Amino acid sequence: MEMTPLFFDGLVRRRIDFMSRGIDPRNNGYIKIHDSSISIWEETVDDEDMLSEVLGPLVNLMRRWGWTVRSDQRIKKHYRILNKYHRHCRRGQLEAKLSISGRHLEIKFFQNVANVSNPHGGEHEFDILARMPYLLRLQTIWFISKAAAHLHASHGYRLSDKQGGSKDIGPRGSTAMQFIEHNYAQSWHLDKTLGYPSGSDASYNNKSADGGIVTHGMQVWIRDSKGRRWLRGTAYYNINNMWWVVTGPYSIRNIASFDISIHQPANLRDRRNQRVRRSALEKQMLKAIATMDFHRAETLRQKLFGNQPLFRIWHKEKQAWYGTQNCGYSCDTSRAGLYTRDEAERSANAHEFLEIKGAAA
């Protein structure tokens, strides 16, 4: 059961309307909900007032709901001066972080029991709500709606009418065109005469991949997110050299002009995803090694490298390994990128701070 943000927002809005009819807003601020987080943006008070007037009562309320609320140990250890503005909360397998920064207060719910792929934990995942097990997701929705109702009833905060990002697009949310129209309405760069932001006529903003000029409303061609196939869509100017490309009623991409083609490619079946394929297969191989699925790891190794000896690249200054395809760094050897001798020498020989080391994989 995955809820789109707009549908989720509607549930919370109806709960607030039901629980707090007749209450006049007192504080000049608003509540915003995004994924598994609920935030307050206050227009008038500072962080000390937020701490005493909002955070304190909210912590007491969460304790009555069965939460254990303590100091955030990471903040306490490394940023002790900020300790009073941060809390770590736990209720069973569900966790939350409370934080205040200036006029902003946020509660972020997360879990670390299932579907967690980020090595730094579930708090740092994308799509946290969608990754949660069913019951934890329902608990999160319940707590966010209760917190929103409390903040409105106790402080007069109103639920923001502003929509979120492109994740709101879908059958239960908005269409791609509605999203663009909303984006234009919020843009400071909107040219009311044109009906869209200014700047699309600058050569450095509209030069296409095939040497042409991208114009607002024209039919264009782009690669999908994995570079596997061509998509046809309609280009709408966004900002600088970025363009919205609508490829379906609920499908939209934000693409730089130099990645857009204005002419139909000669071969629509042509795939230019060797780099993406290599990176994906290498990550699968490293994952198979980590889980001791050595048969699969050897199959992937043969597919990628054959019988060539493999090497890793060590960055002496950063004290970390190069990631796959020279992208990123890792202190974990099992996550380090693998290279053939030619690839490693090509990358490392030009820099004294890089060192080639043999890999056992």
Image (tube, helix red, strand yellow):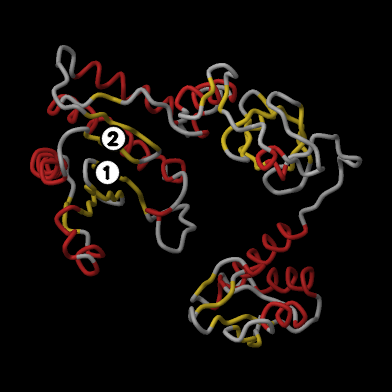
Between 210 and 220, the residue placed more toward the observer is 210
Q: Position of residue 37 (x, y in %)?
A: 33, 40
Tag 1 and tag 2, C-beta contact below 8 Å:
yes
**Residue beneath label 1, please?**
107
Question: Is 278 in front, or is 299?
Answer: 278
Q: Residue 124 in the image: state x and y as whole percent.
A: 41, 54
- Which amino acid, mark 2? Ile
In front here: 34 or 315?
315
Looking at the image, which residue sits at the far top? 22
Residue 229 relative to residue 244: left or right? right
Q: Quick one: 357 or 317, which is closer to the camera?
A: 317
| Crowd around label 1: few <14 · some 14–19 · many ≥20 (10 Å) | many
Q: Position of residue 208 (x, y in %)?
A: 75, 40
Residue, x 60% and y 33% (percent of image)? 199
The answer to whether residue 172 is seen in the rendering is no
Which type of secondary structure does the marked residue at label 1 adopt? strand
Question: Which residue type does callout 1 highlight?
Answer: Ile
Locate residue 138: give its quadrant. Answer: top left
- Percent across and percent down for residue 108 are 31, 45
Which numbered mark, 1 or 2, is in the foreground of this view? 1
Mark nearer the N terminus (1 vs 2): 1
The residue that mark 2 highlights is 144
